[in-house]
Image: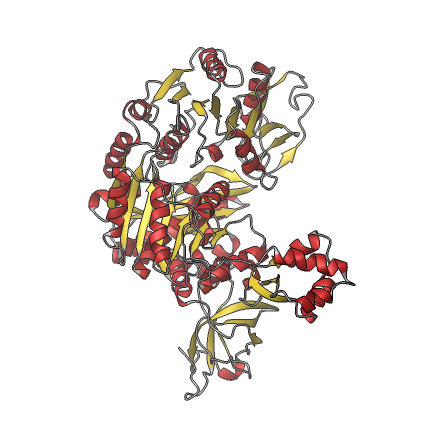
């Protein structure tokens, strides 16, 4: 609602402020109005309690439920122009769908500096360039040899140089200003992000030729290029999905529009950025958690202003405003990291679907192992199912070979036949990837005399033994303590590590193959900035080596010299309590297996397991992920589980077990009464203790809502949140509602 010059200014502004309360707050406008008048989307600084916060005006009105003279005034407006309309729409949709406070949703969706009140304006960087040469000008520099040298350097760079590069050569800003005063050089400013040299040529290097399947897929996407057209690009690992993305984005940018590519992990961002920047001459902007606050704001503004036609980012990049949206691509759409697991529990893939539909633009969901939800939509015809069955290399994806662990002696989790296969691969001059999805040295420490286990005092979990540095650490609450010299129960010094983690496997391999480099890649070894990419750079040189890593290595990395993949233990996800565990384990095994044999040599995948006769594991090994996914979909249908029904999970936690359980019982009673009258399709299960009941010294209780129709589920969730916000007991218990949960832990 715009306050135009011909109409009187509004008397009430309804502002969304960063608070868990699901409501707007009424304020009086301040005396000075913004240049364009009061309207939705303007950031304002307002008093809230005893503090000042940055909020967003959502409505302008002349009436309030409170006396106007009792409303507090806005302290100041922060923007002359409102925030982008498509961004406001997305935030409203997200808050409504995920049953979250609108004020907190807006707060989480904008960069940190905007939350703090910084203006939405890209920072500028000074550039200096030489002006046309003249005899008189050169003559005036005879007594200023350093200025003459500086001018000579500037003439070698006709597009100009930034101040930082000039100072690095030993020149000063005063020397630059002297050249400007003499009309020998000029200063101009360019934005820090999204600035690319103007050019009529879009590509810096030619596109690669497409095979028949890739060309068919790209043509299918182009069939409805100016409309919402969701496509599931289902391609085996190494089948060239990225090349399809590149050529789709080329067409989008050629039409003067912007493309957004979401990738699941920050670790994938550098290699993806490098490939895109080498292909295109236009600006390619990154958005991920590794940026500084200033860098993130610069990138956000460059995309919002339209200067950056290509955006690559992780989960939170779904909230970047697009000036001219043209296409959205979600790579590895099945990946669980697209789901935010705390606070605003959104799923970036699902928001990408909603956003593409809102903008009426193409959407591509790419994966070698699509989620069961996406396969279900493809089967029903909601998504167009595009398949890539051929690898770019001449070798088909390697089949899984199941290796029986029962009764075998292990070294660092590896048995003799596996070690021999590693030895043969290294002797042939190739590389080996050893996958173990457990960081640390060992899952826990045990006393061999009395059976004591190193348990966490704050969680129902064992503490993990680390050697680098030596400590016991809980991976659930991040509590640390020293490794004891003796058993705290019986005093025995016979303490032994149980099981294997990445550190123990690394140590074992280093002892077995002392002349071969061993690179460990997990969250502990890659904390230093750029450490991950530097390690991968060494691996890609091609010398024989051993890679030991967690699922960080399984996602999209091209390792052309790896011909053997070893999965140390495939059993962790087979018998977990979460109904999605088998799906996620199968996806992870297939993805990590896809790292083998991607170039000139065939690959081999050895999967160590205690359950070689498990029917699901055998189906995956013999017939692949697609066959297993089909069976899992049939099992989900019979069990009335997603994607055939929709879920919402109420999580309750309290230091007092009875407080969480009591509130859960009251909520369940309310829901059962309400659904009987208003939404009979909704079922309410619980309350029950969470799979890990005690975590961080708090007791966790779950209440699960299930429905065949989303509309009834959302109506039930809305009723539940209204009751919880009004309940005195709920103020003493921490609670959150997770719509479409990806895990029940």
* Left or right position of 11 against 293: left
Q: Quadrant of the C terminus?
A: top left
Residue ranking furthest to the front: 135
On the rendered structure, is 427 left or right of 473?
A: left
**How is the structure coloured here?**
secondary structure
Nearest the viewer among 526 and 136 is 136
**What percent of the width, then of the height, locates residue 598?**
39, 29
| 690 relative to 471, above or below | below
Which residue is located at x 55 percent, y 18 percent? 509
**What residue is rendered at 52% in x and 26% in y?**
548
Q: Position of residue 319 (x, y in %)?
A: 44, 57
Q: Quadrant of the N terminus?
A: bottom left
Q: Position of residue 360 (x, y in %)?
A: 29, 60
Residue at the image position 44 percent from the left and 46 percent from the top: 276
Q: Is residue 275 visible?
A: yes
Above or below — where is 166 with respect to 470? below
Q: Which of the 4 quarters of the picture holds residue 45?
A: bottom right
Which residue is farthest left? 380
List x then y, in percent, for residue 323: 41, 63
Left/right placement of residue 391 relative to residue 4 reads left
Q: Work out whether residue 104 can be spotted.
A: no
Q: Nearer the viewer, residue 106 or 196?
A: 196
Q: Within the image, what quadrant is residue 498 found in? A: top right
Residue pictured at 48% horizontal, 41% vertical? 271
Query: Along the line of sight, which residue is nearer the eye, 581 or 493?
Result: 581
Question: Does residue 712 appear to the left or right of 467 in the view shown?
Answer: left
Total residue callouts: 0
Residue closer to the observer: 49 or 379: 379
């Amino acid at each position: 609602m715009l306050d135009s010059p011909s109409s009187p200014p509004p008397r009430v502004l309804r502002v969304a402020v960063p608070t868990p309360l699901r409501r707007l707050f009424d304020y009086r406008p301040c005396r000075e109005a913004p240049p364009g008048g009061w309207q939705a989307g303007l950031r304002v600084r307002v008093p809230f309690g005893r503090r000042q916060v940055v909020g967003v005006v959502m409505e302008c009105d002349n009436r309030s439920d409170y006396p106007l003279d009792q409303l507090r005034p806005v302290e100041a407006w922060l923007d002359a122009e409102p925030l982008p309309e498509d961004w406001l729409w997305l935030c409203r949709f997200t808050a409504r769908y995920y049953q979250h406070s609108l004020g907190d949703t807006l707060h989480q969706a904008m960069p940190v500096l905007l939350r703090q009140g910084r203006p939405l304006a890209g920072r500028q960087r000074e550039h200096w360039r030489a002006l046309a040469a003249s005899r008189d000008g050169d003559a005036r520099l005879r007594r200023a040899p350093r200025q003459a040298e500086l001018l000579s350097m500037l003439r070698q760079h006709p597009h100009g140089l930034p101040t930082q590069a000039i100072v690095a050569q030993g020149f000063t800003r005063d020397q630059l200003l002297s050249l400007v005063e003499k009309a020998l050089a000029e200063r101009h400013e360019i934005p820090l992000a999204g600035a690319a040299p103007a050019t009529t040529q879009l590509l810096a290097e030619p596109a690669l030729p497409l095979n028949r399947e890739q060309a068919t897929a790209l043509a299918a996407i182009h069939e409805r290029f100016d409309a919402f057209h969701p496509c599931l690009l289902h391609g085996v690992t190494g089948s060239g999905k990225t090349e399809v993305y590149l050529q789709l984005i080329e067409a989008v940018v050629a039409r003067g529009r912007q493309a957004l590519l979401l990738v699941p992990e920050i670790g994938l961002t550098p290699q993806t950025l490098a490939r895109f920047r080498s292909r295109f001459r236009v600006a390619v902007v990154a958005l991920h958690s590794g940026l500084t606050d200033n860098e993130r704001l610069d990138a956000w503004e460059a995309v919002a202003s339209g200067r950056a036609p290509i955006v690559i980012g992780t989960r939170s990049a779904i909230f970047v405003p697009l000036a001219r949206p043209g296409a959205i691509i979600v790579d590895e759409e099945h990946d669980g990291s697209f789901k935010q697991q705390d606070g605003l529990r959104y799923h970036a893939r699902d928001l990408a679907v909603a956003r593409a539909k809102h903008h009426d633009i193409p959407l591509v969901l790419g994966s070698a192992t699509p989620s069961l939800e996406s396969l279900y939509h493809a089967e029903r015809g909601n998504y167009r199912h595009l398949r890539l069955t051929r690898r770019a290399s001449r070798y088909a994806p390697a089949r899984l070979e199941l290796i029986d662990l029962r009764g075998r002696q292990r070294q660092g989790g590896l048995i003799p036949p596996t070690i021999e296969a590693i030895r043969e691969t290294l002797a042939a001059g190739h590389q080996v990837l050893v996958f173990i999805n457990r960081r640390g040295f060992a899952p826990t420490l045990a006393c061999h005399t009395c059976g004591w286990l190193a348990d966490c005092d704050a969680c129902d979990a064992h503490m993990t033994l680390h050697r680098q540095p030596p400590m016991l650490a809980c991976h659930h609450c991040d509590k640390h303590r020293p490794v004891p010299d003796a058993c705290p129960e019986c005093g025995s010094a016979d303490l032994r590590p149980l099981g294997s983690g990445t550190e123990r496997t690394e140590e074992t391999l280093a002892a077995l193959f002392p002349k071969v480099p061993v690179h460990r890649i997990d969250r502990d070894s890659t904390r230093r900035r750029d450490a991950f990419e530097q390690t991968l750079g060494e691996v890609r040189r091609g010398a024989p080596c051993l890679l030991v890593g967690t699922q960080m290595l399984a996602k999209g990395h091209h390792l052309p010299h790896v011909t053997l993949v070893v999965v140390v233990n495939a059993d962790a996800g087979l018998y977990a309590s979460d109904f999605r565990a088998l799906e996620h384990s199968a996806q992870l095994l297939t993805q990590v297996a896809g790292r083998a044999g991607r170039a000139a040599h065939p690959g081999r995948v050895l999967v160590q397991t205690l359950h070689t006769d498990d029917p699901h594991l055998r189906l995956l090994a013999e017939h692949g992920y697609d066959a297993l996914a089909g069976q899992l979909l049939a099992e989900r249908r019979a069990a009335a589980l997603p994607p055939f029904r929709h879920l919402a999970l109420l999580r309750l936690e309290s230091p007092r077990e009875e407080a969480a359980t009591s509130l859960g019982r009251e909520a369940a009673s309310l829901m059962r009464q309400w659904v009987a009258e208003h939404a009979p399709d909704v079922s309410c299960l619980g309350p029950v203790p969470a799979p890990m009941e005690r975590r961080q010294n708090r007791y966790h209780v779950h209440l699960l809502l299930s429905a065949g129709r989303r509309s009834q589920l959302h109506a039930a969730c809305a009723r539940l949140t209204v009751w919880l916000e009004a309940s005195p007991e709920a103020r003493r218990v921490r609670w959150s509602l997770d719509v479409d949960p990806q895990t029940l832990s």
